[in-house]
Image: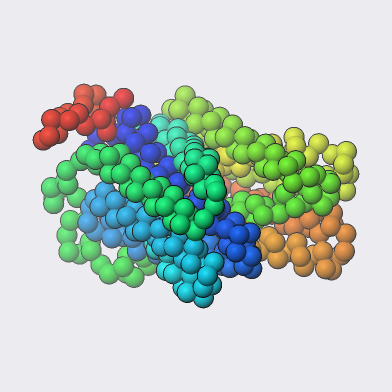
Amino acid sequence: MSERACLGWLGIVRLGLVQAALGAIVVLTTSTMNRVMVVEFALPAMLPGALVALHHVIQMSRPRFGYGSDVGGRRTPWIIGGMLVLALGGIAAAMGTALMGTDPAAGTAVALLGFVMIGLGVGACGTSLLVLLAKRVDTGRRAAAATIVWVMMIAGFAITAGVAGHFLDPFSPQRLILVTSVVAIGAVLITLLAIRNLEGAPLPAAATDVATKRDKPSFRVALAEVWGESEARRFTLFVFVSMLAYSAQDLILEPFAGLVFGMTPGESTQLAGVQHGGVLLGMIVVAVTGTLLKKAKHSVLRAWTIGGCIASAAALFGIALGGFLAPHWPLKATVFALGVANGAFAVAAIGSMMALAGHGRRGREGLRMGLWGAAQAIAFGLGGFLGTVAVDLTKFLYGAPEVAYAIVFGAEAALFLASAVLAATVRQPRPVEVREEAVPTFGDAGLIEMAEGR
């Protein structure tokens, strides 16, 4: 990061707008279209489940996209290109979903193409955005930057769901395509405006991370080099195990509340809101402490990562125990605690990821970030599926739902404890001083480049 000025708060918010735009398209494909397939068109629930899982599997391409941006030396083209592919994929998915109402086979084929494009777009855009954050954000601001970007992504989810939901009524397949197209076009425009002049001009060849022919091996050779780095390999394993535990609870917590605690659909939905509130609080706490305690920034992030995993395990053990004491166990408080722990560990892990991206052979930041993104995508794809399968299997074997859920929640807690052990083995890099540009410059068109503004 020493070659260029680090981003100020406004630059971080601009990248957060790109993440929010990304989330706006994704939320329509994973929630709205999911519901339309199952409710309006009475198709099997496994169809949208398979399509969503497919877009996670496609994100195994993240390391390749990251390496491509390493070789080119710039992230902006990959962010814009990825967003364009994502937008086209979202529109194609909407067209396929609409077509399912009259021709399920043809609609599924079109939706399949759309979800493949969504996976490719998210992989290219999301990976390069994180690398740009890692390379251009000062070490002391990483926890806050991760919080800002992720909160803005959640805001993108919420705003899009609310506004799009309003305009989707009364529902028609044509209206679904129109609303999705408007959201996709808006996301592309926001990305183009937010990313404009943010990265800066390309560095001279002598200053680039990958400057010589010897530093540009094939992707397979470069991937083998990065996997040979002990810290990158350990962190990859940590990301996979922790995100497997994190995602496995998503699809089983609300059914657990209904079956074991007798909560109504409205009450279990409110429970999910309680958890998300806890996640937000945990993120904010880590962001504040990581920013204030600048002298111990690396150790703070490491402590929050390990502590967040341990606290998540404790909360999951509490939920497992609470099933045997229902309805007297304080489930909402336990779920809120789980949310706080999850939010703290997630933001601290992202901050550590940003720090570790440049730790090792130079010019491989994108490849490392892509490797960790692929591990996260695979874990998310597996987590929800394995969590539901495990519940069904244990219910079949033991009958009582509280026993089945206790076993599954206990297994997730064990995964979080294993994640804490893995996080403890990852050494943090030494801090690198970076310069910060205090005065904004003017572009060729006479507009103020606010990327480095405070």
Q: Residue furthest left?
A: 444
Percent across and percent down for residue 170 are 55, 48
> Is residue 266 or residue 278 the one in the foreground?
266
Q: Position of residue 380 (x, y in %)?
A: 56, 58
Quadrant in which the N terminus is drawn: top left
Q: Is residue 94 left or right of residue 400?
A: left
Tell me where residue 438 appears, x and y as whole percent.
Answer: 24, 24
Q: Is residue 162 left or right of residue 46?
A: left
| Picture colour scheme | rainbow
Where residue 179 sits: x, y (%)? Answer: 44, 49
- Judge left or right: residue 431 versus residue 147: left
Q: In the rendered image of this protein, does residue 71 appear above or below residue 19?
A: below
The image quadrant that residue 72 belongs to is: bottom left
Please report the residue visible at 24 percent of the width from the left and 59 percent of the height from the top. Answer: 71
Left of 347 or right of it: where is 357?
left
| Pick the front one: 254 or 234 | 254
Q: What residue lies at 49% left-to-right and 58% top-to-bottom? A: 173
Q: Quadrant of residue 38?
A: bottom right
